[in-house]
Image (cartoon, rainbow, N blue to C red):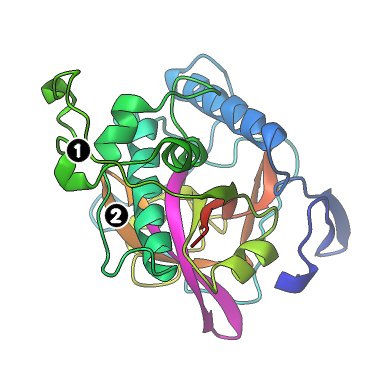
Amino acid sequence: MGLKEWRPNTVIIVKINTTTVTLQCFCNCSGKRQRQKQKQRKERAKQLTDGLLSVSPVTTVVSSSSPMELPPYDPNFTVKISAGNEKKFDYEFDEEHDESLSAAVVAVELISSARLSRNLDRVRTEYSAQYLLDKAASSSGPSLTVRECLEFAIKNGIPKAEDWPLLGSSDKKPPPSYKPPLVTMKGEVAEPDTMDEARELVKHQAVGAKVHIFHPHVELQQGAIYCGTSGEPATYMGLRDGIFTGVEKFKGKSMAVVKVWYKKKFIFLKVAMSRMFYDAYLDIGPTILLENFCAPRLSIK
């Protein structure tokens, strides 16, 4: 399926030998419904990891003496469809992943990029992610999202990183009387509904996105093409915040250049935009590997 054909609720016809499977895609729904689905996924993934849900086992054989080798990128492969509701891959709920910290770090990167692209800053300027963690409050759950961090910064202003304690030093908050100089902004948070819309916006500025992460693929495919799993053994890690910065072509296919916050640092991936995956247990997809786009649309007036 070509990129320009992708739309919410797209019906995909997949032929497997002589069998035809019809799939309807709801993966790019926006707003409240998408966030509710993501919350349900995380809860179910944690239950699976903790053994609270029973599922059909996956039989895999992986050599412990040598690293796993992934198949080469196939531009003609889109999605693997498995019959029935058997478990497709393992799940891992990473308790060390701090969703609020991830959201704040990505949000300030987006703000820095947007202000520079709009000539609101003469040079790239770092803004305080820790300030967002200290001051912003989530309205949708226990963790902040990138969208909420951006909305808070646009509405209330945000200090430069040098004017607030460093990230991770929440125990060293300044006294209540301290009022840092705030950089104010005018604008709004844009939320592209589709990859087409996000691709158009990224021509002008970086766009926030969430990436479906598979292990060991995310480690082995850095610097190459990140495709997720095409049927080989994999562990699904969930969604991670990232920054969509551009598009490249490889073997005639579009690759999204994405900087992803993973394991407490940024890594760079070239995400195959035509790749999809499906998991009935977590109610995912069929979906492309990127979703939940957002970006600060700042005004120069």
State whether residue 57 is above or below residue 7.
above
| Main secondary structure found in the magenta portion | strand
Q: What amino acid does circle 1 point to? A: Leu
Q: Which residue is mark 2?
A: 266
Left or right: residue 188 compared with residue 69: right
Q: Is residue 119 above or below residue 80?
A: below
Q: Nearer the viewer, residue 41 or 49?
A: 41
Q: Residues within 10 Å of mark 2 (few under 14, many from 20)?
A: some
Would you identify the image quadrant in which residue 156 lies? top left
User: Residue sitting at 27 percent across and 48 percent down?
Assistant: 127
38 above or below 118? above
Callout 1: SS: loop
Q: Secondary structure at mark 2?
A: strand
- Left/right placement of residue 173 relative to residue 233 reads left
Gap between marks 2 and 1, in whole Å? 15 Å
Instruction: Give residue 167's mark.
Output: 1
**172 left or right, relative to 191:** left
Point out the stretch of residues depicted in magenta: 236-259
Does the magenta portion include 256?
Answer: yes
For marks 2 and 1, give the one nearer the viewer: 1
